[in-house]
Amino acid sequence: MDSDTLQVFQSELTCSICMNCFLDPVTIDCGHSFCRPCLSLCWEEAQIPRRCPECRGISERPDFKTNIALKRLASLARQARADHDHSSEEQICVTHQEAKGLFCEVDQTLLCGPCSECPEHAAHSHSPIHRAAEESREKLLKRMSSLWKMREEIQICLNQEANTTQSFEDYVALRKVMIKLEYQRMLLLLREEEQLHLEALEQEAKEICEELKESVFRMSQYRESLKEMYKELTEMCHKPDMELLQVRKEVDPKTHLAQIQKPQPVNPELPSWPISGFLHMLNNFR
Ligand SMILES: [Zn+2]
Ligand SMILES: [Zn+2]
Ligand SMILES: [Zn+2]
Ligand SMILES: [Zn+2]
């Protein structure tokens, strides 16, 4: 292959993202092809629908099969480039003065033909450098693929975490509302309790005042009747002797007093209201 043909051949097998020869090429819906790793990275943060990096055409599918024909051609293009650059890149064996064109998988070294036949390497399998390199690329691609899968799994976990965070925030907001409502209800109950408390006290105070008023009235009446009796007795003292002695029997102060009962003073027991309602109410909330 002459230099110009090689250049055309290679440019047709160049990924427009990395500007290198295709690696695991995939052909998307519009017909353009890219290395799978280049497309994966390019589309990683891209919005849906995904677009072709070259023509902006929409690509419906997220996953593509390797374009096997393109992959083989890309491998050939790499081989052709390697052959073309042979002289500059080639390593010469110091012992045999021959080009090192083989790769020993076991020792991971480059060998020339005679080296590969020496006893040290006799039991090893040796392959041409280009084939070994392509095999190595395949292995790397497999590892990359599993890394990418792991990355996607992590993305799913991340989405779940984001959902959990959202749910938790929603829960906290709801709980806040509920706590506020609970306290509002408690305040309402407290006000009702306060009202009942005041009303009960007022009622009781009213009854006691009534009782005290009646007692004062009875006491004043009694005081008045004592005064009346005193007056009667004073009059009796002024009566003539005979009359005094006769009347005295009838108006015996002892029997006279017994007719009027001495009122007992009212000693109301003032209610002591424990502030227990609030505690009781708090307990109901728990
Ligand atoms: Zn690429
Ligand atoms: Zn395109
Ligand atoms: Zn050698
Ligand atoms: Zn070997």
Image: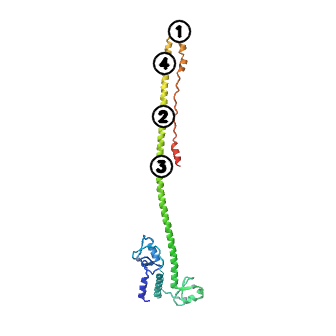
The picture places residue 91, in percent across and down from the top left corner, at 50, 87
Name which of mark 1 and mark 4 comes first in the sequence.
4
Label ID, residue 165? none
Q: Secondary structure at mark 1?
A: helix
Kindly report the distance in space between the C-alpha atoms of the residues bearing marks 1 and 4.
23 Å
* Residue type, numbered disc 3: Tyr
| 119 to the left or right of 20 | right
Contact flag, marks 2 and 1 (Cβ < 8 Å): no
Please give the residue where the numbered disc 1 appears in the rendered image. Answer: 242
Circle 1 packing at 10 Å, graded few (<14), some (14-19), many (20+), is few
Kindly report the distance in space between the C-alpha atoms of the residues bearing marks 2 and 1.
56 Å
Circle 2 packing at 10 Å, graded few (<14), some (14-19), many (20+), is some
Q: Is residue 269 above or below residue 230?
A: below
Which residue is depicted at the point 55% across and 18% down?
A: 255
Please give the residue where the numbered disc 2 appears in the rendered image. Answer: 205
Q: Secondary structure at mark 2?
A: helix
Q: Quadrant of the N terminus?
A: bottom left
Kindly report the distance in space between the C-alpha atoms of the residues bearing marks 4 and 3.
67 Å
The picture places residue 107, in percent across and down from the top left corner, at 56, 82
Q: Residue 275 or 88: which is nearer the viewer?
A: 275
Circle 4 packing at 10 Å, graded few (<14), some (14-19), many (20+), is few
Please give the residue where the numbered disc 3 appears in the rendered image. Answer: 183
Label ID, residue 228? 4
* Residue type, numbered disc 4: Glu
Name which of mark 4 and mark 3 comes first in the sequence.
3
Kindly report the distance in space between the C-alpha atoms of the residues bearing marks 3 and 1.
89 Å
Name which of mark 4 and mark 2 comes first in the sequence.
2
Circle 3 packing at 10 Å, graded few (<14), some (14-19), many (20+), is few
